[in-house]
C-alpha cells in the first residue's frame, strides 16, 4: 500500500503556488510555527519548505529569534539530521527549506503499527543520539525533541525542526520567561523555566524512546498542567518497559541533569545491546519493517507556460573574418539595396500623395454639386409670400436646399470606433475592519457589514469575504495590472480569502458581478490578535469599470 495520500495533501485555496522561487507540489503538514510544503530543487531533489505563520511573522522579536536560529542551524551537519538548504528570515512571510525525508514520523509509525520491538528502539536511540551530537556540536539545544520531530527514513531516523531551538550561547529563557516545548516531552528544568542545557534534550530522548516502546507517553495523558506536574514532582513507572531498555532510559530520565547519560554513552550502550547486528549494519532491514512501504514522492511542478511568448529566433553563428575584397563587395550590395529601398519608398509616398489629393478634389466636386442642385421635393413647392424683397435667413435657406452639417442624413453613416480601454480609478488607503465594509461600486465605504467586501475574524484567523464578488490573491512579482487580475480571476470562484499569507505589499484581485475588477494592495495588516478588536487591513484600491 502506498501512503502518499496520507502524507501529501493537495494545495488549498489559501496556499501559495510558490515560495521564493520554489514551486509547491503538495502540503505535508502544519505545526505551531507554520505550514510545511513539498517542493524540489532545480536538480529535482525533494525538499520540505516551512512557511512561518503570518501572526508570528508580525512579531519583530520572533523574527530576530528566527534569524538567529536559522544562522545556527546552517552549521548543523549529521547523518541523522535533515540538512538546512535555504532560508529567509526577512521574507514575507519568513521561510526555511530542508532536505525532504521520505518516511513517516515516529508518531505516525507507532499510531499505525503499535509499539516498536526492542531492537528498533535501540537503533532509534542510537540514531537520535548521534543527531543530537551534531546539533549540540553546532551550539544548539533542540528544546522540542518528540516523536513527531523524528522521521523514520529507510536508512535510519532523522531529527528535524529546529524552529524553536535556541543557540546555547544565548539566554535559555524566552522573552516572557515561559516554557517552550511540548509538555509531554519536556524535562523538569524546562517545565519550571529553569536553565536549559544539552542534558535537556537527553531527557526528551528518554521520553521519546519510552513512547516508541510503549506506544503512549511515559508520563500519561491529560491536561498540560497535570503532565508537567508529574514530570517535575514524580518518578515515572518504568516496569512496563522491556528489561533491556530500563537501565538506559532510567539514566536519561534522571531528575538531576548532571546525572543523566551522555549522548556518547547512549550510543555505546545501544551498540553493545545490538551486538552483531550493529557490526553487520542490520539497521535498514529494521527500518523498512517499521516505516512500512516507501512513499512515492510527487514529481516537481513544471513551470507555467508564459501567457505572452516571443518567437524563437536562431542566434547567428560566428563567422570567419571577411577578406578586404569581400567587405568592399558587401558594402556595394548594401548601398545598392539601400538606394532601391529609398527609391521605392519615394515612389510609394508620391503615389499616396496624389491619391489623397485626387480623393480630396473629388470630395469638393461632390459637395459643390450637392449645394448647387436644388432639392426636387422643394422645387415644386410654392414659395411663401414675403412682405420684403430680402429673403429670410432661417427656414427659407433650408428650403432652398442648403445641406445640414450634422447628423447621419447629412454626412452619411459614421465609422464604428473601438471601445476605449477601462481606465483605473484609484481609491487610496481604504480601511477595512469588522465594523465596516467596502463596495466596488460608488459609494466605496460603508459604515456597516453589508458591502461587497468584508473583513471578518474567527478563532482560525482573519479573511476577506464577499457575497457577490470573487476574490483571489496574486503571487509573484509586485506590480499587478488589469490583465494580471483578469488572468488570475479566470476560473476562480472563491468568495473568501484567508489572510494568513498576506502581508504588506500583497496584491488581491476582486471581480464584481457587473464586470468591474478591483485590485487591493495591502499596506498594513493587523491580524495577530483576532479577538482584541484591533484587527484591520489598510489597502490601496484601484477599480477598472466595465
Image: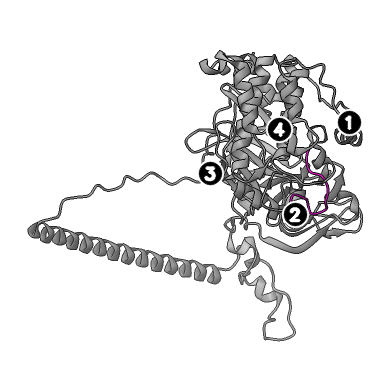
Earlier along the polypeptide chain: callout 2 or callout 3? 2
Q: Quadrant of residue 536?
A: bottom right
Mark 1, residues whose alpha carbon is within 10 Å: few (<14), some, or many (≥20)?
few
Mark 2, residues whose alpha carbon is within 10 Å: few (<14), some, or many (≥20)?
some
Relative to the observer, which residue lies in front, 514 or 152?
152
Q: CA distance from mark 1 to mark 3?
A: 66 Å
SS label for mark 3: loop
> Residue 313 magenta-drawn?
no
Residue occupying the point 70% across, 23% down: 6
SS label for mark 4: strand
x then y, percent, for residue 505 = 68, 56
In the picture, measured across the screen, residue 499 lies left or right of residue 66, that is right
**What residue would you read off at disc 2?**
58
Magenta segment, principal secondary structure? loop
Q: CA distance from mark 2 to mark 1?
A: 40 Å
* Residue 29 disc label: 4
Mark 3, residues whose alpha carbon is within 10 Å: few (<14), some, or many (≥20)?
few
Residue occupying the point 59% across, 38% down: 134
SS label for mark 2: loop
**What residue would you read off at disc 1?**
234
Task: Indicate whether 184 appears above or below 342.
Answer: above
* Residue 307 disc label: 3
Earlier along the polypeptide chain: callout 2 or callout 1? 2
Q: Quadrant of residue 23?
A: top right
Amino acid at each position: 500500500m502506498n501512503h502518499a495520500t496520507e502524507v501529501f495533501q493537495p494545495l488549498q485555496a489559501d496556499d501559495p503556488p510558490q515560495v521564493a522561487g520554489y514551486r509547491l507540489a503538495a502540503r505535508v503538514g502544519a505545526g505551531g510555527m507554520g505550514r510545511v510544503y513539498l517542493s524540489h530543487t532545480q536538480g529535482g531533489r525533494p525538499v520540505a519548505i516551512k512557511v512561518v505563520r503570518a501572526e508570528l511573522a508580525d512579531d519583530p522579536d520572533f523574527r530576530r529569534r528566527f534569524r538567529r536560529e536559522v544562522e545556527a542551524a546552517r552549521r548543523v551537519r549529521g547523518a541523522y539530521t535533515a540538512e538546512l538548504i535555504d532560508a529567509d528570515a526577512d521574507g514575507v512571510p519568513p521561510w526555511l527549506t530542508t532536505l525532504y525525508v521520505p518516511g513517516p514520523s515516529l508518531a505516525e509509525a507507532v499510531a499505525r503499527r503499535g509499539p516498536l520491538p526492542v531492537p528498533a528502539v535501540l537503533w532509534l536511540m542510537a540514531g537520535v543520539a548521534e543527531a543530537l551530537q551534531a546539533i549540540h556540536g553546532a551550539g544548539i539545544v533542540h528544546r522540542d525533541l518528540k516523536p513527531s520531530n523524528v522521521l523514520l527514513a529507510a536508512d535510519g531516523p532523522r531529527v528535524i525542526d529546529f524552529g524553536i531551538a535556541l543557540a546555547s550561547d544565548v539566554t535559555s529563557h524566552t522573552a516572557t520567561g515561559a516554557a517552550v516545548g511540548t509538555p509531554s516531552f519536556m524535562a523538569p528544568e524546562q517545565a519550571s523555566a529553569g536553565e536549559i542545557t544539552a542534558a535537556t534534550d537527553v531527557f526528551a530522548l528518554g521520553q521519546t524512546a519510552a513512547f516508541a516502546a510503549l506506544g503512549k507517553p511515559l508520563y500519561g495523558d491529560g491536561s498540560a498542567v497535570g503532565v508537567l506536574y508529574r514530570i517535575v514532582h514524580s518518578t515515572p513507572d518504568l516496569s512496563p518497559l522491556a528489561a533491556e531498555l530500563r537501565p538506559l532510559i532510567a539514566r536519561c530520565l534522571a531528575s538531576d541533569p548532571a546525572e543523566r547519560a551522555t549522548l556518547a554513552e547512549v550510543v555505546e550502550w545501544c551498540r553493545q545491546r545490538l551486538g552483531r547486528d550493529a557490526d553487520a549494519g542490520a539497521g535498514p532491514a529494521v527500518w523498512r519493517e517499521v516505516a512500512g512501504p516507501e512513499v512515492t514522492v510527487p514529481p516537481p511542478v513544471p513551470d507555467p507556460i508564459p501567457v505572452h511568448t516571443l518567437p524563437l529566433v536562431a542566434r547567428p553563428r560566428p563567422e570567419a573574418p571577411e577578406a578586404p575584397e569581400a567587405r568592399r563587395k558587401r558594402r556595394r550590395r548594401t548601398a545598392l539595396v539601400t538606394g532601391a529601398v529609398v527609391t521605392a519608398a519615394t515612389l510609394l509616398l508620391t503615389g499616396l500623395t496624389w491619391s489623397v489629393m485626387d480623393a480630396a478634389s473629388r470630395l469638393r466636386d461632390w459637395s459643390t454639386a450637392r449645394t448647387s442642385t436644388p432639392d426636387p421635393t422643394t422645387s415644386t413647392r410654392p414659395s411663401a409670400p414675403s412682405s420684403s424683397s430680402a429673403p429670410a435667413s432661417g427656414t427659407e435657406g433650408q428650403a432652398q436646399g442648403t445641406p445640414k452639417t450634422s447628423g447621419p442624413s447629412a454626412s452619411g453613416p459614421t465609422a464604428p470606433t473601438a471601445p476605449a480601454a477601462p481606465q483605473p480609478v484609484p481609491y487610496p488607503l481604504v480601511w477595512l475592519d469588522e465594523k465596516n465594509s467596502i463596495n466596488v461600486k460608488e459609494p466605496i465605504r460603508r459604515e456597516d457589514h453589508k458591502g461587497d467586501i468584508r473583513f471578518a475574524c474567527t478563532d482560525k484567523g482573519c479573511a476577506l469575504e464577499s457575497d457577490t464578488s470573487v476574490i483571489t490573491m496574486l503571487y509573484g512579482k509586485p506590480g499587478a495590472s488589469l490583465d494580471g487580475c483578469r488572468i488570475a480571476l479566470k476560473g476562480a470562484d472563491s468568495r473568501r480569502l484567508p489572510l494568513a499569507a498576506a502581508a504588506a505589499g500583497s496584491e488581491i484581485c476582486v471581480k464584481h458581478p457587473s464586470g468591474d475588477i478591483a485590485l487591493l494592495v495591502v499596506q498594513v495588516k493587523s491580524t495577530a490578535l483576532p479577538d482584541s478588536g484591533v484587527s484591520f487591513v489598510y489597502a490601496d484600491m484601484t477599480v477598472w469599470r466595465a
